[in-house]
Amino acid sequence: MLSAARTLPQRAVRRYTVVASAAAAAAPTATLAVRVHGGARYADKDGLAHLLSRFNFQSTGDKSALRLVRESELLGGALRSSVDREYITLQATFLKESLPYYVNAIASVLYKTSFKPHELVESVGPAAAYDLAVATSDPVKVAEDALYAATYRSAGLGRPVLFDGVEQVTLDDIKQYANKVYTQENIEIFATGVEERDLKRFVGESLINTLPKGSAIKEAAAPKAFAGEVRVRAHGPNVAAVAIPAESAAQIPELQVLKAYLASPLYANADALERVAFDSFSGTHGLLSMYVKGADASAVSANIKKVVADLKAGLDIAPAKELAQVDAALAAQQSAVPVEQLALDKVAKFKLGKFAYSAVGDVTQLPYRDEL
């Protein structure tokens, strides 16, 4: 991908899907997303995927970063690159008639990013540092990262998403990682608000068809989960958080319903929770996390103990099935990528088993895991 000399492959991109709703079809705008299995869990070094994501939409072989952004602005569109534990996602939102331009723009980024040394120093590095500063200023986000570290330790999903400079990453590291993950077999293309035949035609005519063949690095097997604990001493609000791993596909629907239940008035202590989230990975494993936040460490301690006691005693979460289905439907409408269908027939009661715990803030006052 770093060289113009490429052999035209004999087959097109592995797969791409169009997701459309009636509302999207009637709207004048469209969204295009290219999802790469190259998130933090797959990177060879901590923060490597984050830096590669920040290199997206920098200079390519035929356009400078400034030209690319200005052209997109003139067309009324917006470009975005993001990274999480599973994916690097390149996304564009634009007027429907501009679909060919944005397919070609994203294809050029995947195939011909220049990886110029000065951009790492002047653009990519400062942008990555800003992302880190924003994340570390939010105690809930700090608690979330600590939960992943406590659950999965330092491998795969437990690795940090954002580059923090602890592990040195060079420009060559970023180039090599791009070559590894930006391949035909490792990307998925989705769009809303456009015709499937148009998307297929424009993708087929783009540089995406000249990406090298590679192997999909998607991790389907569930990683080993631990009942760990991480405590982070920090100024500001206190956060106590609990994470429950889904170690098989069968547990995912139950935790999705539990999420809906805890965040709704169906749960008597819902007001004690600042946030409830569920992340699914490969459809085979995931992590439910819940957070109690407050200025008073004693109140946070009391609330997290109350929530955990409820979970240990057992909860009838069946009444939240419809809420979970509504949440999934809303997520599908708001996303350019498919949302997994829920199979909720067997969901009834939940009782807490294995869980990880993190505390952020005045950890002298916040409880330990074995005190919950």
Image: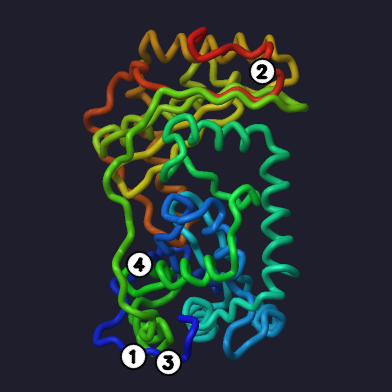
How packed mark 4 is, by other alpha carbons closer than 10 Å (few <14, some 14-19, many 20 or more), is many
Rendering quarter of residue 56: bottom right
| Cα–Cα span, label 4 and label 1 | 18 Å
- Quarter of the N terminus within the rendering: bottom left
Of the residues under marks 2 and 4, which one precedes in the sequence?
Answer: 4
Instruction: Check disc 2 and give the amino acid type.
Output: Val
Instruction: Check disc 1 and give the amino acid type.
Output: Thr
Camera-side residue of 245 and 51: 51
142 left or right of 214?
Answer: right
Residue named by callout 3: 5
Residue named by callout 2: 363
Residue named by callout 4: 186
- Report the disc number at residue 7: 1
Of the residues under marks 4 and 1, which one precedes in the sequence?
Answer: 1
Residue 278: percent from left, percent from top:
44, 37
Of the residues under marks 2 and 3, which one precedes in the sequence?
Answer: 3
